[in-house]
Amino acid sequence: MTASAVCADHLRRFVDQLGKRQAALIVGLHPPQGHSHDSKVTSRLAELGFLPGELVTVLHRGPGGREPLAVQVGDSVFALRALEAACIEVHHGSIAPAP
């Protein structure tokens, strides 16, 4: 089971599902499944700039293609755990290789 299964159903696409050098537009943030009343993760991601309409790019993945994920939003680069990346929903039609 991927980390995105923790946050959402199979019809959605999340940052943890993007490949290296893929970019997509952020649609929204969702708390981890089972923590719907705990918005600490999503609040922190929003404070960092993971907001709807922003372009997010997966730059690198940790050993074995796992975590942490190095992602870029705007001019900033962040290391995210899979659980955090799985809470960032992206528009799957907007996924494209990063320049």
Image (cartoon, rainbow, N blue to C red):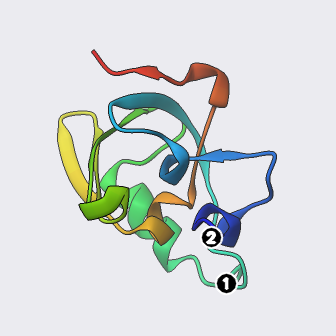
Q: Residue at x 26, y 60 (%)?
A: 62
At horizontal 54% and vertical 48% (from top left) the residue drawn is 17
Where disc 1 sits, the SS reads: loop
Residue 92 horizontal side relative to residue 80, left or right: right
Q: Amino acid at mark 2?
A: Pro
Location of residue 52 (image quadrant) = top right
Residue 12 picture location, percent across and down = 74, 46
Q: Are marks 1 and 2 in contact (CB under 8 Å)?
A: yes
Q: Tell me if mark 2 has few (under 14), some (14-19) or many (20+) residues whose alpha carbon lies within 10 angstroms of its own.
A: many
Looking at the image, residue 16 lies above or below residue 84? above
Q: Please report the residue visible at 52 percent of the width from the left and 30 percent of the height from the top.
A: 25
Q: Residue at x 69, y 84 (%)?
A: 37
Quadrant of image for the N terminus = bottom right
- What residue did someone put label 2 on? 31
Along the line of sight, the residue nearer the viewer: 47 or 24? 24
The residue that disc 1 covers is 35
Number of residues whose C-alpha sits closer than 10 Å to that of mark 1, classed few (under 14), some (14–19) or many (20 or more): few
Indicate the position of residue 32 as horizontal and vertical percent values: 62, 74
Q: What's under tag 1, amino acid-wise?
A: His
Toward the top, the furthest residue is 99
Q: Is residue 3 above or below residue 20?
A: below
- State which quadrant residue 47 falls in: bottom left
Q: Position of residue 74 (x, y in %)?
A: 26, 33
The CA distance from mark 1 to mark 2 is 6 Å
Relative depth, front residue between 7 and 21: 21
